Image: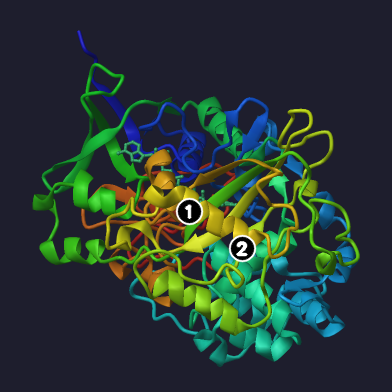
Amino acid sequence: MIQEERYDFVIVGGGPNGTALAAYLAKSGASVCVLEERPEAGGACENTEPIPGVRITPHAMYMYSGPSPGFEQLELHKYGFRMDWSPQSENLADQQARGVATTEGMSPITDKDAMGFAKLAGMLGNPPFIKDLLRATFWCPPHPPEVEVTAENIPYMQVYKQHQPDVWTEELLDMTMFDLMDEHLETEPFKVMHAMVAWYSGAAGHWEGVAIPAFACDITLTMYSGISVPRGGMHGYFHSIIRCALAHGAVVRTCCPVDEIIVENGRAAGVRLRETATRDEKRIWANKAVVSAVDVKQTFLKLVGPRHLGSSFRKKVDEISVKGGSIWVSHLLTREPLIPRPKFKAPGCENPGEYGGPYPCDSREIYFEHVADVDGRRGDPTVPPERLMWIATQSTRFRETDPQCTIPGVYLESPYYVLVPPPEYQPDGPDALDKKKEEINAYMRKAFSQVIENVDDDNLIMHLANTPYESEFRNTGLIGGTWCGTRHCDDQWAENRPLSELARYRTPVEGLYLCNQTACHPGGLCHMAIPYNLMHILIEDGLVEPGKWWYPSPWYIPQDGKISAIPR
Ligand SMILES: Cc1cc2nc3c(=O)[nH]c(=O)nc-3n(C[C@H](O)[C@H](O)[C@H](O)COP(=O)(O)OP(=O)(O)OC[C@H]3O[C@@H](n4cnc5c(N)ncnc54)[C@H](O)[C@@H]3O)c2cc1C
């Protein structure tokens, strides 16, 4: 006889967000089941080996979650989490000496640049306050709807007011990251480089009203994690999260795609699996809540039937912009190590494989040309390869004892990232760019060859690439083929993410909550922020009572009439 299955919480999607939430809930004593469509959990937090001895990360590569309370609260060190600090992050003076790459060669980073950057990042505070700043930006749920959001209660604004009052100004809330940098830094290439890192990491350098979120995206990577990766790559980090969830009793079922979120009497009651799922019983019931950890469009346009949602709400979901930056990811397998051209051999950048971009950082005109191409047009990329902006990971980022490629006499430089127009907005269909993959790969190599002297046919063994649309297929939770799924601009940030009525992770369907990068503040990246923030809301709704290990964000404001997530 088929057994009925029932849990306190049923989570749809076993990516980093759904699984970290399962760990939080299971540690709080709840029964939890995670349902994952693919044969392996992890979502876009995966490592792969397309050829034996060639290890690539098609998506999440770098550690952005360093300041996360999740490390302490879930005790991930007990479940195998270890960092592999980048050898290049060890000496900041070397980094400054290396300079910034422009079409003319390496441009120096001045003391004013370095000190201004360190000041904004909270490194000059006594004590330094970078962790408080980052936690205030990402690890705090948006404020309740009855609270007017002002300069007096936006979390990161309070951190500056407290620790670095000369940075605090009401105008900060209207600024772009470029405006902020113009006030505190000196050279244009240094500013362009950081705006570009921000664009590739979430909130972009040119978006108004998100100067600090954009800057925070940048420094989480460049300052806090020193552009490092966890040992075993991002999937190694994910393993520590899933091990924690399993150790506390969560059930994770793979090959179990969900086709429907069952709504009974206006309340999410459980889910129905696809016919092909590896379970005999296709319905799984939730006593307390169903959590959708898959993308916001799939959740409301497919999994929840139209009769349970208003048509204007569905239309708003349909219109959420996916222009978050669709990434073409290249992996270059070569006979000889890649060597920078002489003009890029700055101090500390003399060895093969030392140069990783961003390039070209001459001016914001180049930056805006690329932005306009990606966000303002539908179709193929049109920026001339000489001016195309890209970021790469140097092979020297990995220790000699842990190279990405272990085939003797073969070298791997991976990944190289380039933003291209989103597949969803291609006039010839979302697979339009995939059909010209070799042509686009050649265009990318031409761009890389502005800096690298031997990306030529004689040296190249293979150019592997995942297009944005391929990324969507590989990780079925991705939309827009992007790093972040949807935009992180002012109108999709914090209390507006992705729509104001969804900002606190609740939905129009009672008992249905959201926990995916596309649907929740603070959006993309594997920083365990969404599950942590959502915990505040589940506590408010009386669905979970974590133990003494729990602490809320110091900037959290409880909602009127709810249970406070601040322990008594
Ligand atoms: C090219 C690229 C580079 C990136 N680089 C970084 C980086 O360096 N550092 C970083 O931290 N982040 C990076 N990211 C972002 C990061 O990978 C994502 O933000 C993160 O994976 C989002 O996690 P998630 O759990 O919200 O969604 P996902 O990872 O998309 O997980 C969703 C899961 O739900 C499953 N699913 C979907 N539909 C169903 C269904 N109907 N039923 C059951 N299961 C379903 C999917 O198979 C998937 O496993 C990158 C992303 C991309 C695309």
Residue 380 placement: quadrant: bottom left
Q: Which residue lies furthest to the top in this view?
A: 1
Q: In this view, does 317 lie to the left or right of 225?
A: left
Observer-nearest of 35 and 532: 35
Task: Look at mark 2 in the image and give the residue it sits on.
Answer: 447
The amino acid at mark 1 is: Glu
Q: In this view, does 56 lie to the left or right of 506?
A: right
Query: Quick check: can you spot residue 478?
Result: no
Give the mark count. 2
**Which of label 1 and label 2 is nearer to you?**
1
Image height of 364 relative to 78, above or below: below
Counting residues from the N terminus, which is met first, the one under dot 1 or under dot 2?
1
Residue 58 image point, x, y percent: 55, 43
Alpha-carbon neighbours of circle 1 within 10 Å: few (<14), some, or many (≥20)?
few
Write the residue at 73% across / 28% down: 407
Image height of 312 relative to 372, above or below: above
Observer-nearest of 304 and 285: 304
Write the residue at 45% across / 77% down: 372
Write the residue at 79% across / 59% down: 340
- Secondary element at tag 1: helix
What is the quadrant of the N terminus in the image? top left
Q: In this view, does 289 lie to the left or right of 215?
A: left
Task: Look at mark 1 in the image and give the residue it sits on.
Answer: 439
Q: Residue furthest front?
A: 458
Q: In this view, does 190 lie to the left or right of 17?
A: right
Label 1 to label 2: alpha-carbon separation = 13 Å
The amino acid at mark 2 is: Ala
Residue 79 image point, x, y percent: 65, 31
Residue 496 placement: quadrant: bottom left
Alpha-carbon neighbours of circle 2 within 10 Å: few (<14), some, or many (≥20)?
many
Residue 129 image point, x, y percent: 73, 69
